[in-house]
Amino acid sequence: MPKVEINGVSQVFWSQSGAVQALAETSLSIDEGEFVCIVGPSGCGKSTLLNLVAGLAKPDTGHVIANGKPVTGPGPDRVVMFQESGLFPWLNVLQNVMFGLKMAGVPEPERRERAEKLLHMVHLSRFTQAWVHELSGGMKQRVALARALAPNPDILLMDEPFAALDAQTRDMLHDELEDLWASTRKTIIFVTHNVREAVRLGTRVIVMTARPGRVKSIYDIDLPRPRHIEDVGLVKIAATIRDDLRGEVLQATHEEGID
Amino acid sequence: MNNVAHQAPSAALTAIAQTKARKDRLDRWRIYAMRLAFFASLIGLWHALVWLEVWDEMIFPSLPQVTETLWLGMSDQSLPAAIAISMQRLLIGYGLALCIGIPLGLLLGRVRWLNETVGMLAMGLQALPSICWLPLAVLWFGLGESAMIFVVVMGALMALTLATRDGVKNMPPLYMRAAHVLGASGWRLYVHVMLPATLPAVLTGAKLGWSFAWRSLMAAELLLVGVGLGSLLERGRELHDMSLVVAVMVVIMFVGLMTDRWLFSRLEQRFVHRRWGTSA
């Protein structure tokens, strides 16, 4: 049984120029332990798709099944990590990581222990008492990762989590995420506009079409791990996928009137 | 930053850092000195006006007169008693306003139909000086404490409610999404996310509400006979004792300043500036 089953979901919204279809009927099936990366031009609905799996939005048609149950709202089995960390400034680093555990009713000593372990894993043991504004962008995303992992979700949804980081920090976080995935075998759905990042991380890369978004093509990535973003094989595959994507990007920019 | 292991800098760098620290200390003393000089010249100006006899002593009391009145009021307990009774009314009224205003503001920020109805009423009431409630309050609650407390509540409530509501409306939506995803729902969203996220706005509203509460109370005490700082002002007017009037004004300003420095500023420093990384 697939871990996540997306069955003919679509979404429309109303704008000044009339009805806009953000996402055309899309179906996708993701197995347990897969690391699926979704790439597509801006506005293709890849974040919408992620929100539907997260339960933060409801599809206008179709449905999503996660862990064998239809998705009706957010749940602790599917935690999202956003492009901006979304960390709470009124809590320190440790309290941020403990937040999900507190909501789940985990008693204080245990949630502290689990949070400290996670912060150790993301190399932030020395910053448990720091406030969010004292952290760099990369550190914030590490804390956000620890916070997302704290409720121990078996599905991790990542919405361009490293897009705002510099290249060195991003490389480092790729390594850490790869290690994490290898050791925990969580199912990860990772949305990005960076094709190389997708090939660097994913077991599968899904290319989406320009708006209205739908699955255009699927690439299985069989490269050995650990991977490096500048590996020749990786760069080659990324080039193929980028060619595939180019037409969609052109169409998207054309629609946005930027051409 | 906490818990960061620093490598000890060289002696030369340490010296530079020490110089910086010394300059900071000096700056702080400079500010104290400036403040002292400012208030000293204010008192000087006061003296000058008295000495030049611009106004008659009867209507423009001198500093020694006011000090004497303050001293007398303190020693015969009339001033502390008035402060105590006014503070009591203020704290009850303001406390009630906090208990109603903050939850109401959170609800208005989150529940749209409530905001379109109750929110609009609150906006209207905000424009109404709360002392306008006094005639009705006296009829409803009698000539006593309850009427005055009601006026204080109405004075502070709207500022608090509306500031809290606006805090919720200006909250980054990402906080709510993150909280949802991490399993927060229902009342927990209010207590663990919305309230702390809007704390900067709530504190601003609380400060505003506090000053509105004072104004309302003074107006009510001036109009209703009884004990309290406002009533003392009224007595000063009746007895044509202007040094009493000025003394009461000084006391009110002093209490206001102290509340801001010892309560609101500290709360802001501790719960807002330090956490959000905003400047003090």
Image: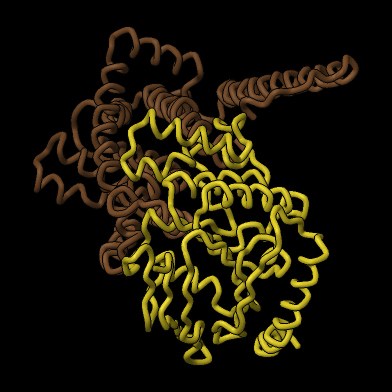
Chain colours: A yellow, B brown
**Residue pictured at 58% horizontal, 50% vertical:** A182
Spot occupied by residue A179 in the image (x, y as percentages of width and height):
62, 47
* Residue extending furthest toward the bottom: A18
Outermost residue toward the top? B75
Pick whichever, B65 or A193, lies toward us: A193
Residue in view at x 62 percent, y 25 percent: B3
Q: Quadrant for residue B240, please give it.
A: top left
x and y percentages locating residue A204 in the rendered image:
60, 69
| Count of numbered tags | 0
Q: Looking at the picture, how far across and down is residue B189, in whole percent?
A: 34, 51
Left or right of residue B42: residue A54: left
What residue appears at the point 25 percent right and 46 percent down from the top-left corner? B100
Measured along the vertical axis of the image, is residue B193 above or below residue B82?
below
Q: Nearer the viewer, residue B245 or B150?
A: B150
Residue B74 drawn at (x, y percent):
34, 11
In the picture, which quadrant includes the N terminus of chain A?
bottom left
Q: Residue at x 30, y 32 (%)?
A: B230
